[in-house]
């Protein structure tokens, strides 16, 4: 939905024009998976799919929320009654951001919000981060809070971790808040330092396909938290603050010190090699050798499948089929256990690859996947 339509719907719902309209995108992660809660490196870029919010301030301590994408009317909440863990619905994301802003001491006295999002939910494409960031940016502007983008991302992460109760890292919110069109974001999640890496696939005759397997994932479910706890155990056993501190060339020695901790060994190996893959990808892109990142993506998938153990038959089928049909590289993206895979391909091969994946899914009796091309798009911004 465009800004105009969202504003018109706001006016119908609330009886007045909104003070403004903002947008925040979903993301795909090119490389750097399950590294963000290990203080490591990630490299997402923004999708054209986005959450759009029309918002006005209120001064009576009331938050009114409405979404075009969810059945039901306007939800009315009192700001002083917002409390972590009390809301299990979509409203927890925007309400959690208001809660996090207020908890951090920022004066937000209420808001009327109408939302509409094109980011697929449960597809590993950060639909929840898009919702959080669009609200954070709108309130930052309207209440003149003066918070920088990285700080807004931190507050959104707090909303997700504490208010919603999903123990996620900082990648998704930072991607939505900070990505730039035509670039991938090389982010160091330890200090949130960022570099925008030019990533114009179309100019090079390449395409990046997103294959949403339609297998729904859920982060508040236990597996994500278990991996995170396993990584923290690894860091503790190795005497470092985070697995980021294990250098790639010291990996074998570190693994040897873990003795017979077989599961921790696998987790540590994934994280340390994945950080190296991000750095290798950045170096290749900087050198203009975009095609050469394909095998790095594929290596990343093998590591997520075999060491981190968060793939699933549908994701593996996308990767195997795409590679057999001539893709340059492919891997799952996002949290895992379903969601989406990405496929890097020559533009000329897109139709063949798409058909091959669709046929393989039909033959395996899997749900029909949703396949689209991802173009690095702008991060969060005010539309009107
Ligand atoms: C989810 C989380 C992120 C990150 C990825 C895995 O998307 O929200 O913080 O951990 O999984 O890389």
Image (spheres, rainbow, N blue to C red):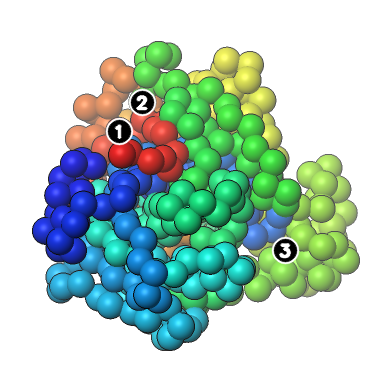
Residue at 29 percent across and 61 percent down: it is 113
Residue 207, numbered label: 2
Residue lying furthest front in this view? 59
Q: Secondary structure at mark 2?
A: strand
Q: Nearer the viewer, residue 218 or 131?
A: 131
Of badges 3 and 2, nearer the viewer stands: 2
Occupied quadrant, residue 154:
bottom right
Residue 272 appears at what percent x and percent y? 72, 50
Locate residue 197, reporting x and y percent: 57, 27
Query: Which element carries disc 1, helix, strand or loop?
Result: strand
Question: Residue beneath label 1, please?
Answer: 373
Q: Indicate if the residue with disc 3 has its beta carbon within 8 Å of ligand 1.
A: no
- Count of numbered marks: 3
Q: Which of disc 3 and disc 1 is earlier in sequence? A: 3
Q: Is residue 74 visible?
A: yes
Q: Is residue 363 left or right of residue 55?
A: left
Q: Which mark is residue 265?
A: 3
Where 131 sits versus 95, above or below?
above
Few, some or many C-alpha atoms within 10 Å of disc 3 (few <14, some 14-19, many ≥20)? many
Nearer-the-camera pick, 366 or 197: 197
SS of the residue under disc 3 = helix
221 vs 191: above or below: below
Q: Are marks 3 and 2 in contact (CB under 8 Å)?
A: no
Seen at 29% across and 23% down, the residue is: 349
């Amino acid at each position: 939905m465009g800004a105009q339509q969202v504003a018109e719907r706001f006016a119908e719902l609330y009886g007045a024009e909104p003070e403004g309209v903002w947008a925040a995108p979903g993301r795909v992660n090119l490389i750097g998976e399950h590294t963000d809660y290990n203080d490591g490196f990630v490299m997402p870029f923004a999708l054209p799919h986005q959450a759009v919010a029309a918002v006005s301030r209120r001064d009576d301590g009331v938050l009114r929320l409405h979404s075009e994408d969810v059945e039901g009317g306007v939800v009315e909440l009192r700001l002083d009654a917002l409390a972590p863990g009390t809301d299990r619905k979509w409203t927890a994301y925007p309400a959690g951001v208001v809660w996090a802003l207020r908890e951090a001491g920022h004066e937000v006295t209420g808001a009327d919000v109408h939302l509409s999002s094109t980011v697929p939910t449960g597809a590993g494409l950060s639909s929840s981060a898009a919702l959080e960031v669009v609200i954070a940016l709108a309130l930052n502007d309207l209440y003149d809070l003066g918070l920088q983008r990285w700080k807004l991302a931190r507050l959104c992460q707090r909303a997700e971790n504490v208010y919603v109760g999903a123990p996620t890292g900082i990648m998704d919110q930072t991607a939505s808040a900070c990505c730039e069109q035509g670039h991938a974001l090389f982010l160091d999640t330890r200090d949130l330092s960022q570099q925008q890496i030019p990533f114009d696939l179309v100019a090079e005759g390449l395409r990046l396909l997103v294959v949403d397997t339609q297998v729904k994932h859920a982060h508040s479910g236990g597996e994500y938290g278990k991996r995170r706890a396993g990584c923290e155990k690894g860091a503790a056993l190795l005497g470092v603050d985070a697995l980021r501190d294990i250098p790639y060339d010291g990996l074998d020695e570190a693994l040897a010190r873990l003795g017979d901790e077989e599961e921790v060994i696998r987790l540590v190996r994934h994280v340390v090699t994945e950080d190296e893959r991000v750095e290798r990808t950045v170096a290749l892109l900087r050198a203009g050798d975009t095609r050469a990142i394909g095998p790095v993506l594929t290596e990343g998938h093998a590591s997520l499948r075999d060491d981190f153990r968060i793939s699933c038959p549908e994701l593996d089928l996308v990767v195997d089929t795409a590679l057999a049909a001539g893709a340059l590289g492919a891997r799952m993206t996002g949290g895992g256990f379903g969601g989406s895979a990405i496929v890097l391909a020559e533009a000329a091969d897109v139709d063949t690859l798409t058909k091959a994946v669709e046929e393989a899914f039909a033959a395996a009796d899997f749900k029909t996947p949703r396949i689209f091309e991802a173009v690095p798009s702008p991060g969060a911004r005010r539309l009107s």
